[in-house]
Amino acid sequence: MPARPLSNLPVMSATAFRTAIEAMDVDAAVALMADDVVFESPVVFKPYVGREAVATLLHAVAQTFEDFSYVDQLDGADGSHVLVFSTRVGDRRIGGIDYLRFNAAGQITQLTVMVRPLSGAHALAEAMAARLQAAQPPA
């Protein structure tokens, strides 16, 4: 028998995260995250750890994705959630998921993003690299 979450906090947090991202309110989405949140990118091997690092990435994503919308939501018996999205980067349509895990307080502890097709992942990687490089202060 699958584990059941102890409360409905993950459901409320997943809904609040979805609402914030759909409104492109990155700060509201980041406020739902644990201080030690782990973000696993579809295009970078090493995960990003911490609310500040994830905030930087999500702000860049919000400026990169076009025509973003969630098209489905799957709620796991263990309190995890999958938000299925559709978006565009340049001329590439991208489908993907945001996989969310939560702590007992309902804070997001893990955000794993997966995208397809490969050409879309490449377009995303190129656009994000350029945006993040431009955001760094000069040395």
Image (tube, helix red, strand yellow):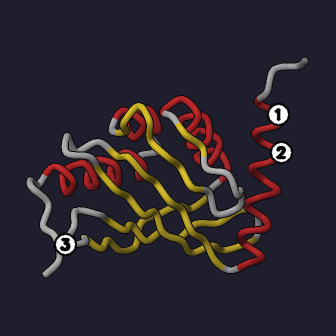
**Which label number is shown at residue 134?**
1
Marks 3 and 2, Cα distance to the nearest angstrom?
39 Å
- What is the tally of numbered marks visible in this picture? 3
Picture coordinates of residue 108 (x, y %)?
34, 46
- SS for callout 2: helix
- Looking at the image, is 103 positioned above or below residue 88? above
Query: Which quadrant of the structure image shows residue 96?
Result: bottom right
- SS for callout 3: loop
Q: Is residue 74 left or right of residue 11?
A: right
Q: Is residue 7 left or right of residue 123?
A: left
Amino acid type at circle 1 is Ala
**Which label number is shown at residue 130?**
2
**Which label number is shown at residue 77?**
3
Picture coordinates of residue 18 (x, y %)?
35, 54
Q: Does the residue at mark 1 contact the one at mark 2 (Cβ under 8 Å)?
A: yes
Picture coordinates of residue 116 (x, y %)?
64, 77
Query: Which quadrant of the structure image shows residue 94?
Result: bottom right
Picture coordinates of residue 138 (x, y %)?
88, 19
Please report the residue visible at 76 percent of the width from the left and 39 percent of the height from the top.
Answer: 132
Marks 1 and 3, Cα distance to the nearest angstrom?
41 Å
Please report the residue visible at 39 percent of the width from the left and 41 percent of the height from the top.
Answer: 29
Amino acid type at circle 2 is Ala
Amino acid type at circle 3 is Ala
- SS for callout 1: helix
